Amino acid sequence: MFNRGKRAGKWNAAAVIVLVLFVIGLIVGLRDNLLQLLLPIVILGGIFLLYKYPPSFLGGARGGRKHAHVTQSRPSATKPKSSRPRSKNVPFRVIEGGKDDDDLPKYH
């Protein structure tokens, strides 16, 4: 499914060690104290759900906030156009510097 190049499907030793230690820690943690592992999972899950589906009273950007409909008094096609353009079409020109850089070091 994913193109990983020449190393497709190979596990390096560090990844295997970390995965084995994670599984061992999860099993020991579940056996010794279920609440200690369950509490952070519930808190992080609640934060994720609030982020994904914000409640309507917070006014989230996903439909919780309603905008008032504003109508214009005159259509934008009848607006008077300004008589002069906003900017002039001036070609770029190079302004030579007046400082002599030969006696200064490049890095100071």
Image: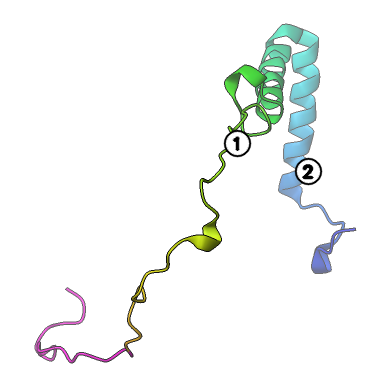
User: Mark 2 or mark 1, which is nearer to you?
Assistant: 1
Among the two numbered marks 2 and 1 on one chain, the one whose residue lies closer to the N terminus: 2
Name the amino acid, label 1: His
Identify the main secondary structure in magenta. loop
Kind of residue sitting beneath label 2: Val
Q: Which residues are magenta?
A: 91-108
- Residue 100: within the magenta? yes
Q: Is residue 83 above or below residue 49?
A: below
Q: Is residue 45 left or right of residue 57?
A: right
Circles 2, 1 touching at the beta carbon (< 8 Å)? no
Please tell me which residue is depicted at 56% across the width and 39% down the height of the picture.
70
Q: Is residue 38 above or below residue 80?
A: above
SS assignment at label 2: helix
User: Dividing the picture into quarters, in which one does residue 61 lie?
Assistant: top right
Q: Which residue is mark 2?
A: 16
* Circle 2 residues within 10 Å: few <14, some 14–19, many ≥20: few
Identify the disc placed on residue 78: none
Vertical side of 100 occupied by 107: above or below = above
* Nearer to us in this view, 71 or 90: 71
Mark 2 → mark 1, Cα distance in angstroms: 58 Å
- The residue depicted at 81 percent of the width and 20 percent of the height is 27
Place of residue 80 in the rendered image (x, y in percent of width and height, measured from the top left): 43, 64
Left or right placement of residue 37 versus residue 101 in this view: right
Residue position marked by numbered label 1 in the rendering? 69
Q: What secondary structure is found at the residue carrying circle 1?
A: loop
Q: Residue furthest right?
A: 1
Across and down, in percent, residue 100 comes to 10, 90
Where in the figure is residue 35, as x and y percent of width and height?
72, 7
> In this rendering, would 74 be left or right of 45?
left
Q: Nearer the viewer, residue 59 or 21?
A: 59
